Amino acid sequence: MLTSIKSIRNNPQMLLLLMAFVMPLTFSVWNALLNNFVIDKAQFSGAEIGILQSLREVPGFLSFTAVFVLLVLREQIFALMSLALMSIGVAITGWFPFEIGLYCTTVLMSIGFHYFETVNQSLTLQWLDKKDSAHFMGKQLAVKGFASIFAYSMIWVLMEWLGFSYNIVYMLAGGSGLLICLIIFIVFPKFKETTTQHKHLLMRKRYWLYYALTFFSGARRQIFVVFAAFMMVEKFGYTVGEISLLFLINYVFNLLFAPAIGKWIGQVGERKALIIEYSGLVLLFTGYALVENAVLAAGLYVIDHLFFAMAIAMKTYLQKIADPKELASTAGVSFTINHIAAVVIPALLGIVWLSSPMLVFFIGAGFACCSLLLALNIPFIPKPGNEVVKNHFGWANEPKINPITEVRF
């Protein structure tokens, strides 16, 4: 048994999985309660929620500064400190049930969240072999799904059955996350860096397709995160318990299917996976725009969340084309690019929402179309020197492949 415990402690993949558990354990509570909390306690409209979500994305826009922090901190320590900061932000949210207070606690939580996501992506791509990374990322999503299921279940029990206040639930979630971070810091050794990362900013012309996909992913995801959930509360009158159950269903699907999705991406390749994802999202956003039935809207929301698991393909695409020494810097820059649109879109579309919620979702369908066109430029076998198909949209002169060992779309 002692040997088994020691092997777990010395396995960096176990550290990645534990950190993957902590993040949604705290963030899921913040996310699940947000719309009901701001409407019940702060009387937010679509305009205020748009501003709040734009402010939440400002730290994501500044994710490139992570490379400067790495001048003084190891990536592993930085990741844990970021998780702890996020947990503190969640814990104090309930103490500030007014507009400016919510903006401030949201930014604090978001600083920790986005720095963690940046560094965690870098560590994951460094510590994993390319042939195993997609499957492992699927396992990470499954762990996140389990943590989220636990968090949403606790919300249901504590608020619907026991009548706990928003404040107590926020403090329990944030305090639990902070405690687990401390335990991880004490238990796990400091793992050696497999590749010394560049400690300066850089952008490579050969990564342009990854940058473009990242930009539209950020634009599109904000519509899902901000307005799809807000629609459930404002238009269809979902309660805290019903929203928690909806999120619970989402993460049950992640728990069940994410590892298989990751394995499937490793088999069929990034090109096919992303083409399928973006084609489906065009239809889903159109459905959001036209839906009038609360149950059907919930179904669209669950399917939408499942499609996002296929975004693993973007990370493995980067891993296959990037210099290993540039992963930390590229992750920081890509998070910044992801949030260029994310900082602006919630506030602008919050104003559009006041006059036409339908138009907001049609704009989302347009973003998904742009992503689909970009995905057609991904090579069947991405690697350094073959980051983008050489001809227009890859419809001719494709590389010859072995149909037995490789799959192409």
Image (cartoon, rainbow, N blue to C red):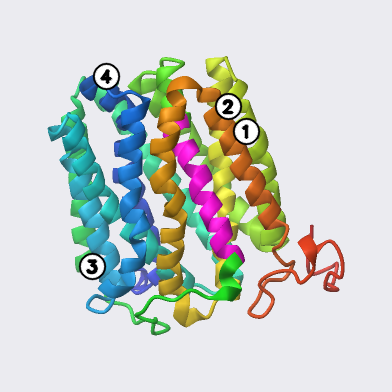
Mark 2 neighbour density, 10 Å: few (under 14) some (14–19) many (20 or more): many
Residue at image x 44%, y 41%?
345
| Left or right: 295 as drawn, with respect to 396 | left
Mark 3 neighbour density, 10 Å: few (under 14) some (14–19) many (20 or more): few
Q: Can you tell which mark lies on residue 161?
A: 4
Q: Earlier in the sequence, mark 4 or mark 1?
A: 4
- Give the distance between the C-alpha atoms of the residues marked 2 and 1, in whole angstroms: 6 Å
Q: Which residue is mark 1?
A: 284
Look at the image and give the residue range highlighted in magenta.
209-227
Q: Which residue is mark 2?
A: 288
Q: Earlier in the sequence, mark 2 or mark 4?
A: 4
| Left or right: 158 as drawn, with respect to 236 | left
Q: Which residue is mark 3?
A: 187
- Give the distance between the C-alpha atoms of the residues marked 4 and 3, in whole angstroms: 36 Å
Kind of residue sitting beneath label 1? Leu
Picture quadrant where residue 114 is located: bottom left
